[in-house]
Amino acid sequence: MNTKTLILPILVIICGLGVVAFLGFTNDSENNSQNNKANKKVEAAESFESNYKNLNLNQKDTSMSDYKVKKDENEWKKELTENEYRVLRQKGTERAFTGEFYDHHEKGVYTCGACHEKLFDSKTKFESGSGWPSFYTTIEGNVKEITDRSHGMVRTEVVCNSCGSHLGHVFNDGPKPTGMRYCINSISLDFEKE
Ligand SMILES: [Zn+2]
């Protein structure tokens, strides 16, 4: 075997190693770019999450400062029963035909179950057949309307304008003179007899 016959296989081996190294490099760079993409996604998700948390905190701050009656959720929890808290502070809904006031006909004023602000006059109560106390209007300025996009629907939520507690929803299928139907959870209300 002379030197020339040795050089050829050595060259082949060197070239082969070069190709392997090159392929390895391109694979690495692909992996790196995939990793970078994944990292970017994680970063984006994390920043979205932290923004979302901040947004929630901000909303909480705003909603608390928006209302005359300022109490934190722990205070409400202490003052309200579990069911009252679930509806008034967590926007729950009582079962139809189970509340204290859907079939209630005394003269007086319905007040907020949380802060006792006057909300509805018994003169504006009507039989809606829904199983929830229903009114065609509110005591002016004391009930606030908010767009509610939960449960895949767009509805108008009504809350107490003094403390922000959830009362129910308002619909435009009510009787004259307003055509509105304020559909309210009994548990969100108290009653002051005339
Ligand atoms: Zn209230």
Image (tube, rainbow, N blue to C red):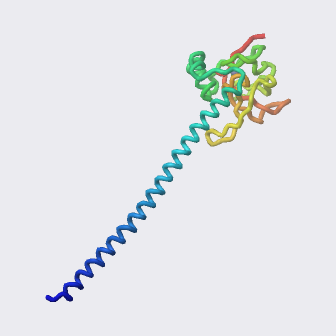
| Numbered disc total | 0
Quarter that holds the C terminus: top right
Residue that extends furthest to the top in the rendered view of this protein: 194
- Relative to 134, does residue 111 appear above or below in the rendering? above
Residue that extends furthest to the right in the rendered view of this protein: 177
Q: In this orientation, which residue lies closer to the viewer: 42 or 149?
A: 42
- Relative to 146, does residue 6 appear above or below in the rendering? below
Residue under the point 81% across and 31% down: 175
Rendering coords of residue 96 (x, y %): 63, 27
Figure quadrant of residue 70:
top right
Q: In this orientation, which residue lies closer to the viewer: 100 or 5?
A: 5
Residue under the point 67% across and 31% down: 62
Q: Is residue 101 visible?
A: no
Rendering coords of residue 34 (x, y %): 44, 59
Quarter that holds the N terminus: bottom left
Q: In this orientation, which residue lies closer to the viewer: 14 or 69?
A: 14
Figure quadrant of residue 133:
top right
Q: In this orientation, which residue lies closer to the viewer: 28 or 55?
A: 28
* Residue 147 as seen in the image, left or right of residue 37: right
Q: Quadrant of ligand 1?
A: top right
Residue under the point 29% across and 74% down: 17
* Residue 4 as seen in the image, left or right of residue 191: left
* Residue 34 as seen in the image, left or right of residue 192: left
- Relative to 45, does residue 170 appear above or below in the rendering? above
Rendering coords of residue 177 (x, y %): 85, 30
Q: Is residue 118 visible?
A: yes
